């Protein structure tokens, strides 16, 4: 395959325009696995590692803009206070070596339903900043996933950053795997409460063809804002589970995933209510 290396963002966009079939690579934690297992062999790789513009993050007016080169390790170390849900999810990604290389943007590009960053991004209402030589396009996170390992990027586009609203209340992430570390999620769930507005965001991972929200559960909880009410928590869990569309595979059965999502939804909601009680 051809190997392209960009040293600036402008050069990267030109290369992608000339070679829309080139697969971008930053940490390589997804792409190289696919290549090594012979599950996919791109015609070209576009290395973005030298592009320093992608390694920065900034915060303005309650929105954190995370460059495509910001690693999970940095999300954990530098953004846990602003984006606790995303930081919690980042802590569950692979090993320290993987977290030192992998990025949220890489997770988005791969668009695997099991990607750990997807539930908190959905729950927070993130927006993906995509760019080509023709300009910038802002894609709401709910519109970004178009199928199994498929996303809404046009052939000449690259992910430049992801914009995530800062916490407006408790945020939590939960994940079930076949072991305690370095594991692909059997299923996962993220929740974000906006205490002032009394609204709720949710994100479901590894339990449908794409990551998805649970809108009926969000509406129910917003309309039944009763911290600590066990009946509300039970119904919330049921509605989250009903929003999923899982399959049976080697990591878990459909029925197990449905049950696990209901449990995770109740537990994360309980943690969120407890934090809300302590800080209010």
Image (tube, grey):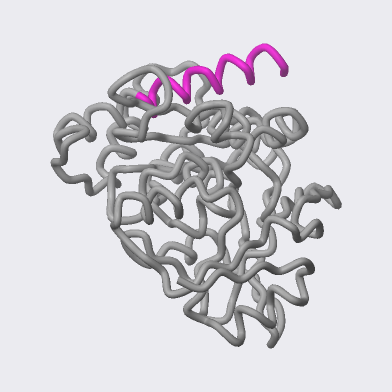
Residue in the image at 28% along x and 33% along y? 238
Q: Is residue 273 magenta?
A: yes
Q: Which residues are magenta?
A: 264-280
Q: Residue 100 appears in which quarter of the rendering?
A: top right
User: In the rendered view, does 133 fall on the left or right side of 20?
Assistant: right
Instruction: From this view, report whether residue 41 is shown above or below residue 35.
Output: below
Q: Position of residue 4 (x, y in %)?
A: 61, 71
Q: Residue lying furthest top in this view?
A: 278
Q: Position of residue 14 (x, y in %)?
A: 69, 82
Residue in the image at 54% along x and 28% along y? 172
- Quarter of the picture containing the N terminus is bottom left
Q: Is residue 239 magenta?
A: no
Q: Nearer the viewer, residue 270 or 175?
A: 175
Q: Nearer the viewer, residue 145 or 267?
A: 145
Q: Position of residue 12 (x, y in %)?
A: 69, 73
User: In the rendered view, does 136 fall on the left or right side of 254?
Assistant: right
- Quarter of the picture containing the C terminus is top right
Magenta span: predominant SS is: helix
Instruction: From this view, report whether residue 31 is shown above or below residue 130.
Output: above
Q: Nearer the viewer, residue 180 or 50?
A: 50
Q: Position of residue 18 (x, y in %)?
A: 60, 87
Residue in the image at 72% along x and 35% along y? 74
Residue in the image at 31% along x and 39% along y? 239
Q: Residue 41 appears in which quarter of the rendering?
A: bottom left
């Amino acid at each position: 395959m051809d190997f392209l290396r960009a040293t600036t963002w402008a050069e990267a966009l030109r290369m992608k325009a000339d070679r829309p079939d080139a697969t971008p690579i930053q940490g390589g934690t997804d792409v190289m696995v696919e290549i090594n297992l012979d599950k996919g062999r791109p015609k070209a790789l576009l290395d973005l590692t030298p592009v320093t513009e992608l390694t920065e993050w900034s915060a303005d007016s309650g929105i954190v803009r995370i460059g495509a080169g910001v690693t999970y390790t940095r999300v954990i170390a530098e953004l846990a206070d602003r984006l606790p849900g995303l930081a919690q999810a980042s802590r569950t990604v692979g090993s320290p070596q993987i977290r030192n290389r992998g990025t949220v943007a890489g997770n988005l590009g791969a668009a695997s339903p099991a990607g750990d960053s997807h539930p908190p991004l959905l729950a927070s209402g993130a927006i993906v900043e995509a760019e080509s030589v023709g300009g910038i396009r802002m894609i709401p996170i709910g519109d970004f996933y178009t199928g199994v390992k498929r996303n809404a990027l046009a052939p000449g586009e690259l992910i430049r950053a992801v914009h995530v609203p800062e916490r407006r209340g408790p945020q939590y992430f939960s994940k079930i795997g076949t072991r305690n570390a370095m594991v692909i999620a059997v299923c996962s769930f993220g929740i974000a409460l906006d205490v002032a507005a009394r609204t709720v965001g949710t994100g479901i991972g590894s339990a449908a063809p794409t990551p998805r929200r649970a809108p009926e559960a969000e509406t129910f909880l917003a309309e039944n804002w009763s911290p600590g009410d066990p009946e509300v928590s039970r119904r919330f869990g049921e509605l989250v589970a009903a929003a999923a569309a899982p399959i049976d595979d080697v990591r878990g059965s459909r029925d197990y995933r449905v049950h696990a999502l209901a449990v995770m939804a109740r537990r994360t909601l309980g943690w969120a209510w407890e934090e809300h009680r302590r800080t209010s």
